[in-house]
């Protein structure tokens, strides 16, 4: 019986599994840590983009696009064109 216990204590066949479990847990911990630091910045940037794009008009037909272009052409400063 004592011999069986000593053989079990010296057996290293399961040690690679333990190493993989520890490395995987470490990788997951590093990933979660990075995510916690980066998420606030990403959220702030996405809110800034949302605020910037909230005033944009989406054209849903070609008629609206022609009206938009005509309005934009009417607002062009003639002095800016001459300076080019």
Image (tube, grey):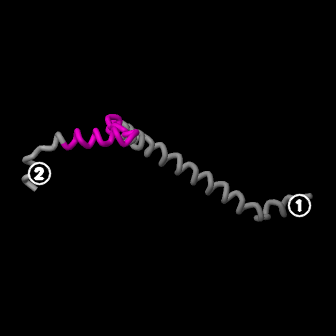
Nearest the eye: 22 or 4: 22
- Report the predominant secondary structure element of the magenta stretch: helix
Label ID, residue 22: none
Secondary structure beneath label 2: helix
* Left or right: where 47 falls relative to 72: right
- Residue at position x 7%, y 53% in the image: 83
Which quarter shows the N terminus?
Answer: bottom right
Residue at the far right in the pictured view: 1
Q: Which residue is mark 2?
A: 81
Quadrant (top left, top right, bottom left, bottom right) of the C terminus: bottom left
Q: CA distance from mark 1 to mark 2?
A: 94 Å
Look at the image and say whether residue 32 sits in the magenta stretch: no
Query: Which of the two marks, 1 or 2, is nearer to us in this view?
Result: 2
Q: Residue at x 70, y 57 (%)?
A: 18
Q: Residue at x 37, y 37 (%)?
A: 50
Q: Which residue is mark 1?
A: 4
Residue 43 placed where, x, y %?
42, 39
- First in sequence: mark 1 vs mark 2: 1
Q: Secondary structure at mark 1?
A: helix
Magenta-tinted stretch = 51-73
Tell me what residue is drawn at x 50 percent, y 46 percent: 33
Left or right: 1, with 84 as reference point = right
Asked if residue 66 is among those painted magenta in the image, a careful observer would answer yes
Q: Give coordinates of residue 29: x percent, y percent.
A: 56, 48
Displayed quadrant of residue 60: top left
Image position of 80 (left or right of 41): left
Left or right, 61 with reference to 21: left
């Amino acid at each position: 019986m004592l011999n069986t216990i000593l053989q079990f204590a010296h057996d290293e066949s399961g040690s690679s599994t333990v190493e993989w479990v520890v490395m995987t847990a470490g990788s997951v911990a590093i990933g979660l840590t990075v995510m916690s630091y980066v998420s606030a910045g990403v959220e702030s940037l996405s809110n800034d983009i949302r605020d910037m794009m909230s005033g944009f008009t989406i054209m849903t037909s070609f008629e609206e696009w022609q009206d938009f272009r005509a309005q934009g052409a009417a607002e062009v400063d003639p002095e800016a064109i001459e300076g080019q």
